[in-house]
Amino acid sequence: MYTIGEFAIIVKLNKKTIRYYDEIGLFQPAYIDPNNQYRYYKREQINDLNRIIKLKETGISLEQVKNITTDSEDVSMKDIYNKRLSEIELEIEKLKKQQDNIKTLLSTSHAERNVNKEFDISKGYYIEQGLIVYQKTEKQKDIHDIINNFYNYAGNKVKLSSGHFFKRSLDDNSDGISEIFAYTTNASEELDIKTQTKELCLRILCDSIENRDLAYASLFDYAKNNNIVVGSIYERYKMNDGKMQIEIMFGIV
């Protein structure tokens, strides 16, 4: 058997780390001398510790490593690595979004926006009557996933006659986007299709995504100042001369 010093050299770890793995029940010595509490390790344990090291190097937490190494069932390392690879790809995607946001912030003016920016608010039947194909959304789901899932769902089963709309709710039990839908000219038994009624709305055509928050604030202010009760909230994105615009509509109860 090997002393902890010898074993540390063999596996290229420091003694402190090996002791810590013992303390948390992750990797224990083959024998502890009852007289001096010295730890001793067997040659067969080299592979066990190397497996732990390799798992840790993939970014898997020590708690997860412990669960994997103590699992009585036959765990496929290939499945573990594939799962971790998927997690890493999601992390990379998240970091790329953060990187893009930082680049955008660096390229834009740092001047404070005028929070009292004025918008043109109009009233009309901006939500028309017609058949719509719709899909309920999950709470806190990424907006890009919502869009992708909707178009994969609708697919080539029906012809969409409009771009997609997001539907939001002021209900305390709702969270974010509650529904995504688009108008269609034909029905399908394979999809969730219903008739959308004509709806009187307040509307702002927001000039940019950056001013979306101020547009919403203006609509809420207008509704309160004019004693208007807001029902459903609709949002649609449009391209105009290569620039993204947001059409925001508040249904009037």
Image: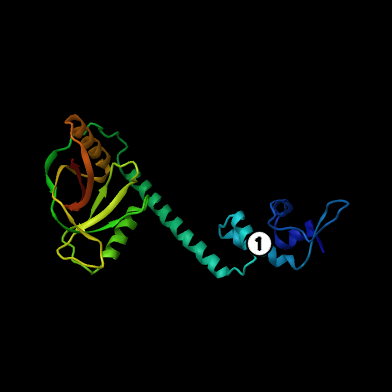
- Locate the C terminus and report the quarter of the image it occupies: top left
242 vs 249: above or below:
below
Dot 1: few (<14), some (14–19), or many (≥20) neighbours within 10 Å? few
**What percent of the width, then of the height, locates residue 62?**
62, 55
Of residue 113 and residue 226, the one placed in the foreground of this image is 226
Residue at the top extreme? 225
**What percent of the width, then of the height, locates residue 208?**
23, 45
Badge 1 marks a residue whose secondary structure is helix
Q: How is the image coloured?
A: rainbow
Of residue 84 and residue 165, the one placed in the foreground of this image is 165
Taking the image as shown, residue 95 lies to the left or right of residue 224, namely right
Taking the image as shown, residue 69 lies to the left or right of residue 173, namely right
**What percent of the width, then of the height, locates residue 107?**
32, 45
Residue at the right extreme? 35
**What percent of the width, then of the height, locates residue 74?**
62, 70
Quarter of image, res 207? top left
208 vs 165: above or below:
above
- Locate the N terminus and report the quarter of the image it occupies: bottom right
- Name the residue: 28% across, 53% down: 179
> Which amino acid type corresponds to the residue marked 1 in the rendered image?
Thr
Which residue in the protein does label 1 denote? 70
Quarter of image, res 58? bottom right
Of residue 105 and residue 72, the one placed in the foreground of this image is 72
- Name the residue: 28% across, 45% down: 169
